[in-house]
Image (cartoon, helix red, strand yellow):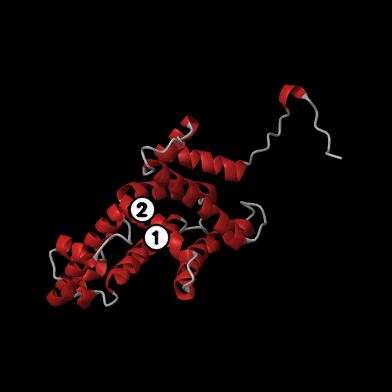
Amino acid sequence: MPDSSDTTLSRREREQRRRQRIMLQAAQSVFAEKGYEQATLGEIAERAEFGKGTLYNYFEDGKEGLLFATFAEVYDDLDEMICSTFEGAETADYSFRAAFHELVVRSFAYYEEREDLFLILIREAHQLCFSNDVEKAAYFQEQQQRMIDALTPAVETAVDEGRIAPLPPQSVAHMLLEVVHDLIEHRCLTEHRDENDATCVCQSDAPLLHDPEAAADFLTALLFDGLENDSPEDGASRSPTP
């Protein structure tokens, strides 16, 4: 995302940011195409049209530095999306349900615009989350908590005002974000699975995976209305389970 602070930077600083942006975009392109392990710094440098030494001047940790800069970009974007979607929770015409619906739609739009970033996040972050590197695993736990913390105030307000059930706000925030993430991840994985894979996507899933409004309607109804039908089928009365 463009940084509005660029207008306050000197010409040299703007040029440095421009170069850094080009390098990062080149790395993201290579990571998305080949995966992190198969990508080489030489190929990234060639695609960015800079020397490897120049890349190290901007990203001291080389390929790994570019990878984590990519993660930071995604998480920054998601944090801003959550905060802006749920702002105004104290206003009279605010609807927590409508805000969640909008979050689903905006999340799908972001995926479609930045599919390369989601590919990298899904492929590489999962492995690092469960790696033996405690520091890297902690990084992703901190980012997940950051997203939860961004949504929690809106959940707390909705609970306090009786708009949603009085459940633990952090747990609710976590669950809401996870269902959105999981549906988008499902779409990403099905679109990029091996063409020779015998598995297929259930046809009934298609509208949910490719129509943001349908996905938002589905998740909103599921989470806010629930699965249970208050009207028993065929007029049969319900009896408590022994």
Q: Is residue 31 left or right of residue 148?
A: left
Q: Of residues 234 and 23, which is closer to you in this image?
A: 23
Give whichever of 54, 221 is nearer the camera: 54
Residue at disc 1, secondary structure: helix
- 122, above or below 203, in the image: below
Q: Amino acid at mark 2?
A: Leu
Q: Is residue 218 left or right of residue 17?
A: right
Q: Residue at x 30, y 49 (%)?
A: 113
Q: How many numbered marks appear?
A: 2
Identify the residue shown where x is 46% and y is 35%.
201
Q: Which residue is mark 1?
A: 124
Which amino acid is tagged 1? Glu
Mark closer to the observer (2, 1): 1
Residue at coordinates 44% horizontally, 58% vertically from top-left? 82
Residue at the extreme top: 234
Question: How far apart are the alpha carbons under marks 2 and 1?
Answer: 8 Å
Residue 5 rendering spot, x and y as whole percentages: 25, 70
Q: Using the image, determine if residue 206 lies above or below residue 66.
A: above
> Where the C terminus falls, by quadrant?
top right
Name the residue beneath numbered marker 2.
Answer: 119
Q: Residue furthest right?
A: 242
